[in-house]
Image (tube, rainbow, N blue to C red):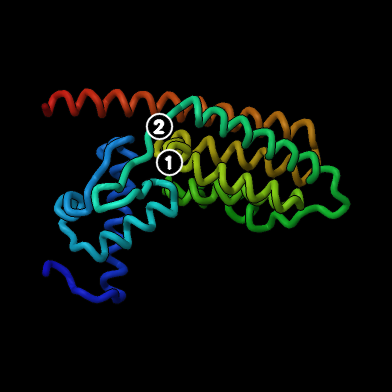
Amino acid sequence: MNQVTQINPEKSSLAELVHQRIRNDIYEFHLLPGERYTEANLAQRYSVSRTPLRLALHMLQREGFLNKGSGHAAWQIPPIDLDYFQDLYDLRVNLELIAIRRICLSEIPPDFSVLKSFWLVTEEERSIDGQVVANADEIFHSTLVKAAGNAEMSRVHTDITERIRIIRRLDFIEGARITAAYDEHAKLLKALIKRKQELAEVLLKTHIEVSRTEIRNLTLHRLSEAANSNRRLV
């Protein structure tokens, strides 16, 4: 066999490496939305045995990057339906606006110390790792909704977050957008700490709308590039 045959720390590390490589290929549209891939094909593509590959594939499935059907040929990159994602973004905005209103009207202010430690830092302390910032972005917005104190609202928001993750993280692959993310989150967090509800609502809507537009444009551009590349290879 090409790799060790038992699950151990070495195999787990290999699975993490394959997981990262596949996820990057999904981001870069080297693996195309809507396409199906066999485990044999993926094992050959990434030069890895089946056990660490399957660990990586199941991690990606949990994160929303892959769908799994029946059989070995059923791993699929979810098709990108931009209208569907627009609807999810609309629902997300409304949930977070409700959260902002509840936060600003609450008697006891939420503990935002974790958010402050990441977003309210000097430029020198900012992360330039898009994956790190993307994770922090999810934590920021989920924390807002959790602070509203409605478990069902938080559950729905978590489901939306998982569904839009595959395109949302495209917003954190360019340096300018990472810088903008820090600036926008910092302004919104400061408004919430001061309980400036109207300002916080405007900042949130602007932040999400700019992000949504950037993601839509980048997604269309990447899909066009991928389609042209595939035509050249035929």
Q: Which mark is residue 141?
A: none
Q: Examine the image and state in which quarter residue 94 appears.
A: top right
Element type at mark 1: helix
The residue nearer to you, when weighing 11 against 180, is: 11
Work out which quarter of the rendered image holds the C terminus and state it: top left
As measured in the structure, the alpha-carbon distance from the residue carrying label 1 to the one carrying label 2 is 9 Å
> Which residue occupies 20% across, 51% down?
42
Q: Residues within 10 Å of mark 1 (few under 14, many from 20)?
A: some
Locate residue 135, reporting x and y percent: 50, 50
Residue carrying label 1? 166
Out of 73 and 6, give the one closest to the viewer. Answer: 73
Name the residue at 53% across, 31% down: 211
Residue 122 visible somewhere in the drawing:
no
Q: State the residue position of label 2.
A: 80
Q: Earlier in the sequence, mark 1 or mark 2?
A: 2
| Residue 201 position (above or below residue 38) | above
- Residue count near mark 2 (Cα–Cα under 10 Å), binned few <14, some 14–19, many ≥20: some
